[in-house]
């Protein structure tokens, strides 16, 4: 339920800004009226990125001021980015092909959208795809399953 706009708080679900060795996202659900995963190298290099089991949805809660990209990478980023089980449900009224960046209209490395699946064939650093909509089994992180009382199950 994040809300933001281009002239103020951007309300990104995740934005590392660069300058990190690696990011790994597994089991994330988020929503915003502005941006989702803003994962390009803004201020420094990123070594690698993995996004798995993630769904991001857009909404039109005011103020709606530009934005609307829920996966945002860049053609000039060289870091390996692996996408697996990633879903984007665009803001109502916004096409899926314009809800990922690079979008279908990008001149350098446009997204290819076929049957509700976006890939970037001209960008060899991106493997995997982004699917339009939500996972058929529901959100990866259901509402109410996290919060102040959440305890991590631990990871190997």
Image: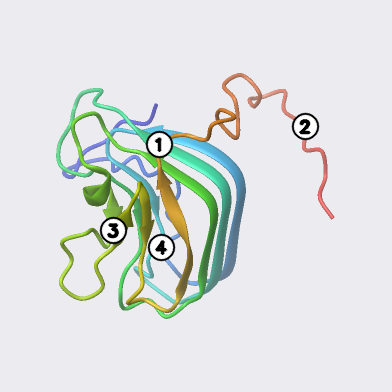
Vertical side of 155 occupied by 94: above or below: above
Residue 88: horizontal and vertical position, in percent? 39, 42
Residue 132: horizontal and vertical position, in percent? 38, 42
Label 4 Cα crowd, 10 Å radius (few <14 / some 14-19 / many 20+): some
Dot 1 or dot 3, earlier in sequence:
3
Dot 2 or dot 4, earlier in sequence:
4
Vertical side of 76 occupied by 87: above or below: above
Dot 4 or dot 3, earlier in sequence:
4
* Viewer-nearest of discs 1 and 3: 1
Residue 94: horizontal and vertical position, in percent? 20, 37
Dot 4 or dot 1, earlier in sequence:
4
Q: Residue at x 32, y 54 (%)?
A: 114
**Real-space Cα distance between discs 1 and 3?**
16 Å
* Viewer-nearest of discs 4 and 3: 3
Q: Report which residue position mark 2 lands on.
A: 151
Q: Report which residue position mark 4 lands on.
A: 17
Q: Which picture quadrant has residue 8?
A: top left
Circles 2 and 3, Cβ within 8 Å, touching? The answer is no
Circles 4 and 1, Cβ within 8 Å, touching? The answer is no
Dot 2 or dot 1, earlier in sequence:
1
Circles 2 and 1, Cβ within 8 Å, touching? The answer is no
Q: Report which residue position mark 3 lands on.
A: 101
Lateral position of residue 87 relative to residue 43, left or right:
right
Dot 2 or dot 3, earlier in sequence:
3
Residue 123: horizontal and vertical position, in percent? 36, 76
Label 3 sits on a secondary structure element that is: strand
Q: Which sits in the foreground, 112 or 65? A: 112
**Real-space Cα distance between discs 2 and 1?**
29 Å
* Viewer-nearest of discs 2 and 3: 3
């Amino acid at each position: 339920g994040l809300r933001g706009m281009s002239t103020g708080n951007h309300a990104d679900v995740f934005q590392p800004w660069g300058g990190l060795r690696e990011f790994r996202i597994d089991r994330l659900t988020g929503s915003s009226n502005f941006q989702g995963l803003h994962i390009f190298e803004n201020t420094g290099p990123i070594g690698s990125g993995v996004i798995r089991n993630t769904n991001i949805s857009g909404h039109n809660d005011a103020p709606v001021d530009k934005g609307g990209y829920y996966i945002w990478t860049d053609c000039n980023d060289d870091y390996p980015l692996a996408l697996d089980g990633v879903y984007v449900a665009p803001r109502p009224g916004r096409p899926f092909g314009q809800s990922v960046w690079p979008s279908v209209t990008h001149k350098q490395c446009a997204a290819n959208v076929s049957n509700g699946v976006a890939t970037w064939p001209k960008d060899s650093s991106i493997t995997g795809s982004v699917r339009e909509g939500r996972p058929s089994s529901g959100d990866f992180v259901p509402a109410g399953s996290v919060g102040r009382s959440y305890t991590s199950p631990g990871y190997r």
